[in-house]
Amino acid sequence: MPVLAINGGEKTRTEGWPAWPPDDPGFLENLGKVIESKVWGVGGEWTRKAEEMMAEYHDAKFAAACTSGTSAIELTLRACGVGPGSEVIVPPYTFIATASSVVAAGAVPVFVDIDEETFNIDPAKTEEAITDRTAAIIAVHIGGSPADMDPIMEIARSRGVKVIEDCAQAHGAIYKGRKVGAIGDAGAFSFQSSKNVTAGEGGMVLTNDADIYSRAWSIINVGRVPEGEWYDHRVMGWNLRMTQFQGALISRGMELLPEHFELRAKNGEYLRQRLEDVEGVCLQKLTHPDNVSAFHLYVFLYDPEAFGGLSRDRFIQALGAEGIPCAKGYNPLYREGVFAATVHMDAFPFCAPYYEGECDYTAVSCPACERICDERGFWMSQRTGLADEQAMDDIVNAMLKIRDNLGELAEA
């Protein structure tokens, strides 16, 4: 019987994982063209090219590039009319920026639980959480797997609520035959270092709504309006413009995206099939069988009982030792100090005179999210999806090795 690597045995996988960003000469070539152009900021062609490529790929009419995925969410909220006194429904299982952007826009996040199998916001619970103060719902396509947009849109339209897609992890993801990003009123994308298309940092707003686009463009461009003069500032905006260097990197990344997307999807579905041999571990469930995940992350659901009561944390520790790096993932956002610490509840916007609700995140509980964060969820980074079938086999074989040697993992 093989000895587990955590106890000194040989690793299941000794090979490394694909590099990210990818080694591709096209990035350097594009950056050289920016340098030669002498136009590195306003007026260059590369951010415009990146916008056009993103919009076309995601079936959107408009795209506005900005500095980060975080700023993309905030300015999209503002462009959709969300502001002081408003509530915005967000899932608690996501990166902090989904909720902190709401606060930055002067609104109050309302956390709604996720579905324990899909890891995405639960539409039924979303409807229950809507009040007269609700201005928007942020649907996060977690790990690249699309949220269940049809019922979310139906709920929102019936209540006059905007829907913003957080697509930071979902470049190219498909929901029932439609690319994410412009299914809702607008979508916010990120090009941060780990993302499936990266420029180190950067963000973008996609929409089919001309008014939302115009307002987003104005906020990005210090309050100018598309039809106005250069020193004609009609909106309270900021300088959130993307540089031409970032646009050049994104443009090359978009050229590589179809190939990378296909590889991630192929490996992801192969891994899903192979996991049928591992009782107690499965990939997150799709919200619809016709969906295609961007597989930014391989997000797993773990059942301790199938592994003799072995905790999730001890399992991923053993898996990492076998050469399969993984992490437990997020904490529920309402437990983060910025929300959980009651000292913040007497600060803007939580106690502002125009906010009529009560705000105490220490009283929030989302059971499905808590089970995922504390006991059942873990993930592998997006580099994993760019490997090959042998790597997927190594993942499964490492899990089987752990299951067959549970006696070596007795916990204190």
Image (cartoon, grey):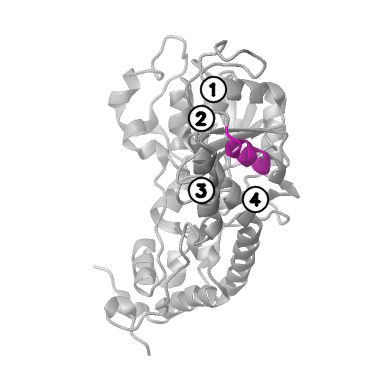
**Residue nearest the viewer, comparing 293 with 150:** 293
Label 4 near label 3: C-beta < 8 Å? no
Residue 370, percent across and down? 43, 47
Residue at (57%, 16%) from the top-left corner?
Answer: 224
Q: CA distance from mark 4 to mark 1?
A: 29 Å
Which amino acid type is marked by label 4?
Answer: Ala
In which quadrant of the rendered image does the N terminus lie?
bottom left
Which amino acid type is marked by label 1?
Answer: Asn
To which residue does mark 3 refer? 32
Residue 174, percent across and down? 69, 50
Q: CA distance from mark 3 to mark 2?
A: 20 Å
- Name which of mark 4 and mark 2 comes first in the sequence: 4
User: Is label 3 or label 2 in front?
Assistant: 3
Residue at (62%, 65%) from the top-left corner?
Answer: 263
Span shown in magenta: 44-54
- Name which of mark 3 and mark 2 comes first in the sequence: 3
To which residue does mark 1 refer? 221
Residue 310, percent across and down? 37, 68
User: Is label 4 or label 1 in front?
Assistant: 1
- Name which of mark 4 and mark 1 comes first in the sequence: 4
Q: Which mark is residue 173?
A: 4
Does the rendering let one see residue 189?
A: yes
Would residue 234 be found to the left or right of residue 211 on screen? left
Q: Residues within 10 Å of mark 3 (few under 14, many from 20)?
A: few
Which amino acid type is marked by label 2?
Answer: Arg
User: Is label 4 or label 2 in front?
Assistant: 2
To which residue does mark 2 refer? 241
Element carrying mark 2: loop
**Residue nearest the viewer, comparing 132 with 244:** 244
Q: CA distance from mark 3 to mark 1?
A: 26 Å
Q: CA distance from mark 4 to mark 2?
A: 25 Å
